[in-house]
């Protein structure tokens, strides 16, 4: 790592996952999605965010959490989506610092009452983010519409944000989930970057890591865009391999030849 930093003048690893929300690369699409989530929260409703794996959905949620006023909102995040209905509410209960009862009925009652207490007594609006929501059991999804509207007047006490792969949209079209789908009016899609955005993204990461010169040539960036399909996580993986190849071969600039060698070393990682 130290050799990499000194060779290219980085102050840190440029393609690391450990990047603060304030330094994230924000495309017009990212900003539109952020506005959509804020509109859902401020409008006391819910949203779905879909996109390919590695497209930046979780980064979007991280940025949202940092941007929300702590005195007005309480965001709870969970990504363990493969559990049954009872264990689903148990993990939410634990995440909220509540007692983890053994029965589903007790768990649901505790969670729903806590959400209502936060809204009424503490004036805190709850945002429940369910990542990897495309993996949720259908029984869990069926139950969510009740959590959204557990008062007789159907007044919601929280905003639900479902985050998952594109097939989550198809799942929500099932007839048995019509009640849930009707309560989630905002649908947001995170698409892969185009070639120009990949170029801007890589240079943004270089600058954020302290490098002010263009290490990647235009032909290298174009090849990276084609090879990764514009998926951020893949760009990061390939970028790391490119830097490793360049350092090994003592290349001062990363061109298409370096990228080709990096692609060979990536293997299944890409």
Image: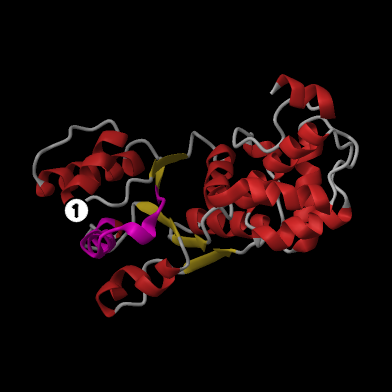
Q: Position of residue 191 (x, y in %)?
A: 61, 64
Figure check: 159 above or below 210: below
Residue at 54 percent across and 56 percent down: it is 37
Nearest the eye: 66 or 125: 66
Is residue 117 shown in magenta? Answer: no
User: On the image, which quarter does residue 181 sit in?
Assistant: bottom left
Res. 182 in view: no
Q: Position of residue 239 (x, y in %)?
A: 71, 44
- The vertical placement of 8 against 127, above or below, is above
Residue beneath the point at 68% across and 39% down: 240
Residue 75, position in %: x, y? 43, 41
Q: Work out whether 181 lies above or below 164.
A: below
Task: Depth check: give the residue in front, 258 or 175.
Answer: 258
- Determine the image quadrant of residue 140: bottom left
Identify residue for label 1. 85
**Residue 261 located left or right of residue 108:** right
Residue sitting farthest toward the bottom: 175
- Within 10 Å of disc 1 (Cα), the crowding (few <14, some 14-19, many 20+) is some
* Residue located at (18% from left, 32% from top): 99
Question: How many marks can you see?
Answer: 1
* Region rendered in magenta: 129-147
Look at 68% across and 51% down and name the residue there: 263
Image coords of residue 62 (percent x, y): 54, 42
In front of the other: 25 or 238: 238
Q: Give the secondary structure at mark 1.
A: helix
Q: Which secondary structure type mostly characterizes the magenta part of the structure?
A: helix
Q: Is residue 27 left or right of residue 41?
A: right
Q: Quadrant of the N terminus?
A: top right
Q: Is residue 16 visible?
A: yes
Q: Residue furthest top?
A: 2
Is residue 12 left or right of 181 when viewed as pictured? right
């Amino acid at each position: 790592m130290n050799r990499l930093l000194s060779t290219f003048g980085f102050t840190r690893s440029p393609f690391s996952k450990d990047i603060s929300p304030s330094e994230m690369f924000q495309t017009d699409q990212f900003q539109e999605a952020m506005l959509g989530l804020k509109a859902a929260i401020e409008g006391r409703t819910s949203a779905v965010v879909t996109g390919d794996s590695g497209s930046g959905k979780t980064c979007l949620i991280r940025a949202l959490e940092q941007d929300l006023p702590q005195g007005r909102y309480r965001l709870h995040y969970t990504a363990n989506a493969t559990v049954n209905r009872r264990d689903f509410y148990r993990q939410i209960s634990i995440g909220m610092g509540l007692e983890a009862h053994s029965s589903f009925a007790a768990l649901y009652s505790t969670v729903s009452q806590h959400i209502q207490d936060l809204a009424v007594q503490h004036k805190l609006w709850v945002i429940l983010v369910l990542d990897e929501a495309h993996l949720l059991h259908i029984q869990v999804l069926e139950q969510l519409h009740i959590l959204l509207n557990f008062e007789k007047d159907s007044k919601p006490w929280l905003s639900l944000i479902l985050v998952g792969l594109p097939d989550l949209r198809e799942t929500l079209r099932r007839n048995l989930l019509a009640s849930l789908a009707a309560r989630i009016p905002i649908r947001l899609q995170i698409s892969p970057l185009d070639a120009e955005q990949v170029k801007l993204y890589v240079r943004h990461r270089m600058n954020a890591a302290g490098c002010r010169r263009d290490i990647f040539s235009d032909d290298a960036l174009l090849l990276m865009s084609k090879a990764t399909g514009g998926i951020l996580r893949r760009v990061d993986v390939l970028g790391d391999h490119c830097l490793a190849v360049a350092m090994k071969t003592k290349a001062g600039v990363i061109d298409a030849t370096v990228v080709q060698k990096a692609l060979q070393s990536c293997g299944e990682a890409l």
